[in-house]
Amino acid sequence: MSKAERLIEMMITINAKKKFTVGELANEFSVSKRTILRDLQELEQAGFPLYSEVGAAGGYHILKERILPPIAFSESEAKAIFFACQALQFYRDLPFEQETISVLKKFLNCLPLDIQNSIAQIQNKVVFWIPDRHCDSPLLKSMFLIAVNRHAATIRYSSTHSESTRTIIPIGLYAMNGLWYCPAYCTAANQVRVFRVDRIKEIIEETSYPKGKYSIPASIQEYLKKSEIQNDCHMKIQLTNIGVKRCESECLLASGLKTFPTGGGIIDMEINHDALEWVADYILPFGNNATVLEPVELIELIQQKIYELHEHYCTVASPLAKSRSAN
């Protein structure tokens, strides 16, 4: 085994151990302790995070932030990794934002120049664009760690209408259209609710909770699959060509969109009853480019919003009209 091969094998071996001694590595690699000490010194100089303890019970520890051993990638695999990173570039917040930037720089700098140029050309031609929501989520990484560690959290949450303090047990996180969402069991409501991470203003306390006490999905994938099954409301919305184009960019509505060869289209799908309020808010600005056919409740919701908007602007218009007449 060459020295280079031994160093790579040693990195793999050390990564798998929590603690080791020079003698253990010397026996494992069939070399002298002096050779192992020189190898360890080279790994430390290369940035491998080792910590040594002296004494009879001493040895080497690898620090928590471990460096992974080298991995060989094909050109296509290198481009695939770049694409994976690029898919997240328009999210304002990521659980490991700085680390993502760092790993992409390291990754690109290690590639041959011709592959770097090839990736640059791809970057100029392909983009995973999502709308910029202008919503910062400074507590995203904290919520990510709470979900991964399967802990509960007491949070201060600002909803559309009020601010409240509640204890939640996160199921996980998912991103959609530039925003991060956290489905979680809310102990006050005794059911699973979806929380927007940018609206979590403070994490007051993080605690453990009795496993098995609450009936919640074991994974975010299970939750999302279950949510699709729970769609309990049939919705039909007739669309003009303009309405079709606007709905194509909204993943929820696009999943039930059917277009007609003659123009226009229709949304015909099952949807969760709790989402009707959101649909009403989304469809309202369409004007006559969207006509809700069913359910009746969605039609009534839009009528109520139009009435409230009309009343609002009548109230605003009256003082303006009096001011103009006075002038």
Image (cartoon, helix red, strand yellow):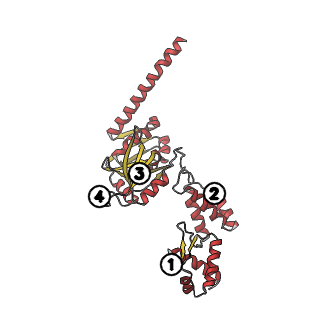
At label 1, the amino acid type is Ala
Q: Earlier in the sequence, mark 2 or mark 3?
A: 2
Q: Is residue 17 left or right of residue 271?
A: right
Look at the image and tell me in which quarter the N terminus lies. Answer: bottom right
Q: Looking at the image, can residue 257 be seen? A: no
The kind of secondary structure element at disc 3 is: strand
Q: Which mark is residue 123?
A: 2
Residue that extends furthest to the front in the rendered view of this protein: 55
What residue sits right under mark 3 in the picture? 205
- Where residue 136 appears, as percent x and y from the top left, is 52, 46
Q: Which mark is residue 57?
A: 1
- Where residue 166 appears, as percent x and y from the top left, is 37, 46
Q: Earlier in the sequence, mark 2 or mark 4?
A: 2
Q: Earlier in the sequence, mark 4 or mark 3?
A: 3
Residue that extends furthest to the right in the rendered view of this protein: 113
Q: Earlier in the sequence, mark 4 or mark 1?
A: 1
Neighbor class of circle 3 (other Cα within 10 Å; few <14, some 14-19, many 20+) is few
Instruction: Tell me the distance, in whole angstroms, between the alpha carbons under discs 2 and 1.
Output: 53 Å
- Where residue 35 appears, as percent x and y from the top left, is 63, 83
**Camera-nearest label, 4 or 1:** 1
